[in-house]
Amino acid sequence: MVVASRGMKHWLIKSEPDVFSISDLKKVKQEPWSGVRNYQARNFMWRDMRIGDLALFYHSNATPPGVVGVAKVASEPYPDPTQWDPASEYFDEKSTEAKPRWWLVDFAFVKEFSQMVTLEALRQEPKLEGMVVLQKGTRLSITPVVKKHFDLVVKLGR
DNA sequence: GCCAACGTTGGC
DNA sequence: GCCAACGTTGGC
């Protein structure tokens, strides 16, 4: 087993299931996390993620919203190719190949929970207090999660 | 550098 | 569909 000396980090990544769900990830096994156009979220992928880091896979804009499984970082960061594709909704005319603005990593499927841990369930668990995703007004599509919280959510979802 | 206007996210 | 919260843009 490979364990980075810095210690593994844990994350929560949001995806709209209508666009890309945990089932989709299960099917394709690995997916470039394209389309992130927020600097904070980009910095997490570009600067802080390492291969092997685990992430809670969260369905946003869903009924109900919640965590549905686990994914892991499966690549080094590299420029998001959609930023240079004029046909893409993620096209960014201000980004150049010499100085890419948007970076991503690939995520690989790890597991799908036997039961979803809904946003409501997350809010009702006192031990999860302080989770970034639960804080008021947090819209970030990628947030760090402490190991204690990560492990508990995985336990709740199984 | 300020800040109003505008766009987006995402729960409800 | 509504709207609160927040990020970005652009005029000055």
Image: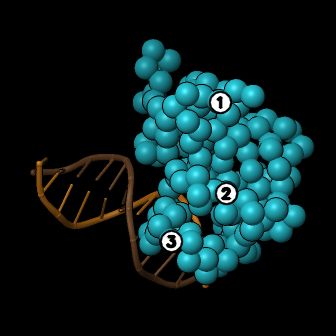
Chain colours: A cyan, B orange, C brown
Q: CA distance from mark 3 to mark 1?
A: 28 Å
In the picture shown, does residue A25 fall above or below A74? below
Q: Amino acid at mark 2?
A: Asp
Provide the secondary structure element on which disc 1 rests.
loop
Indicate the position of residue A95 as horizontal and vertical percent values: 46, 27
Indicate the position of residue A70 as horizontal and vertical percent values: 74, 50
Q: Are dots 3 and 1 in contact, CB under 8 Å?
A: no
Q: Chain of mark 2?
A: A
Sooner in the amino-acid sequence: mark 3 or mark 1:
1
Sooner in the amino-acid sequence: mark 2 or mark 1:
1
Residue at label 1?
A3
Quarter occupied by the C terminus of chain A: bottom right
Q: Chain of mark 1?
A: A
Q: Is residue A23 left or right of residue A44?
A: right
Provide the secondary structure element on which disc 3 rests.
loop
In the picture shown, does residue A142 fall above or below A156? above
Q: Residue at x 43, y 45 (%)?
A: A40
Residue at label 3?
A129
